[in-house]
Image (cartoon, rainbow, N blue to C red):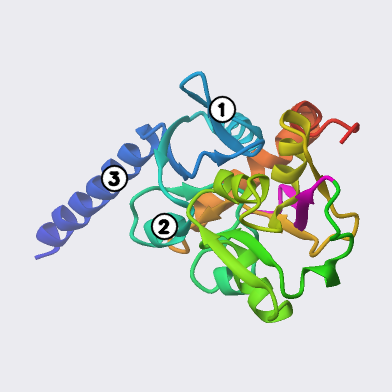
Amino acid sequence: MNFRRLVLKTSLIALACGAGAAFAQNNVLRVATDATFPPMEFVENGKKTGFDVELVEAVAAKMGKKVEWVDIDFKGLVPGLIAKRYDMAVSAIYITDERKKVVDFTQPYYAGGLVAMVKEGSPITKLSDLDGKKVSVQVGTKSVGYLTEHFPKVQRVEVEKNQEMFNLVDIGRADAAVTGKPAAFQYNRTRGGMKVLAEQITTEEYGMAIRKDTPELTTAVNKALEQLKADGGYKAIVDKWFPSSK
């Protein structure tokens, strides 16, 4: 009996070690994103690029892993993560109490927030001017819920893609667009014709979303972020995508 127990115990240890070895050999980090939100993530010349993309790849390099990107609409990022379709979701996702109920977040990696954009020459000059106006927002984002709660008189025009918000304002089918601060300034730098209202709607922080059943991954990513901040890698990426001239 003792011999059998010893054999069983030895077998279980071997299986556990084998599972651990297999996990250690997995050098791929599957990360989901909606690459339609410049400068955070977008496609240029057929390749993903942007602040989030470069930061995730730098984090993965610190962890000794390569990134396998998964394309998905923003509204499906968190549900897909919970369903274990990928390891992380990184797509300018704000850290909110509601999202923290179902997923974990890394330490904040960039401070953003919601702003309103209007066409140059628009009579809308302050946030209170949005009341009664048509405002375009992307479905599944914080903008929708925030406007519903804090700007109930706004007529929301919900679209699937971030670029559609700007297009509606540009052609006059919306009076304003509410989006993340980085995307708003990126649009102004590259396209022009619009302005960001000086009064910011919210100030919030972005985090990398990770499943609650993989706390070791959250710890590893946080460690890599700290290393990037310590060696100057993080600052270099920030300076590239968010120059002080913004």
Name the residue tied to disc 2.
Answer: 76
> Neighbour class for label 1 at 10 Å: few (<14), some, many (≥20)?
some
Alpha carbons under labels 2 and 1: distance apart: 26 Å
Q: Is residue 46 above or below residue 134?
A: above
For the residues carrying marks 2 and 3, which lies nearer the camera in this image?
2
User: Which amino acid type is shown beneath numbered disc 2?
Assistant: Gly
Q: Main secondary structure of the magenta part?
A: strand
Q: Which mark is residue 19?
A: 3
Find residue 123 and report its horizontal and vertical position in percent.
86, 59
Task: Give yes or no for contact between labels 1 and 3 (Cβ–Cβ under 8 Å).
Answer: no
Find residue 94 and report its horizontal and vertical position in percent.
65, 59
> Neighbour class for label 3 at 10 Å: few (<14), some, many (≥20)?
few
Residue nearest the viewer, comparing 195 with 17: 195
Find residue 35 and report its horizontal and vertical position in percent.
51, 39
User: Which amino acid type is shown beneath numbered disc 3?
Assistant: Ala
Classify the position of the N terminus by image quarter. bottom left
For the residues carrying marks 2 and 1, which lies nearer the camera in this image?
2
Of the numbered discs 2 and 1, the one sitting upstream in the chain is 1
Q: What range of the chain is rendered magenta?
A: 106-120
Alpha carbons under labels 1 and 3: distance apart: 23 Å
What residue do we see at 60% from left, 68% from top?
Answer: 156
Q: Which mark is residue 61?
A: 1
SS of the residue at dot 2? helix
Q: Is residue 56 above or below residue 44?
A: below
For the residues carrying marks 1 and 3, which lies nearer the camera in this image?
1
Q: Is residue 107 left or right of residue 24?
A: right
Alpha carbons under labels 2 and 3: distance apart: 30 Å
> Neighbour class for label 2 at 10 Å: few (<14), some, many (≥20)?
some
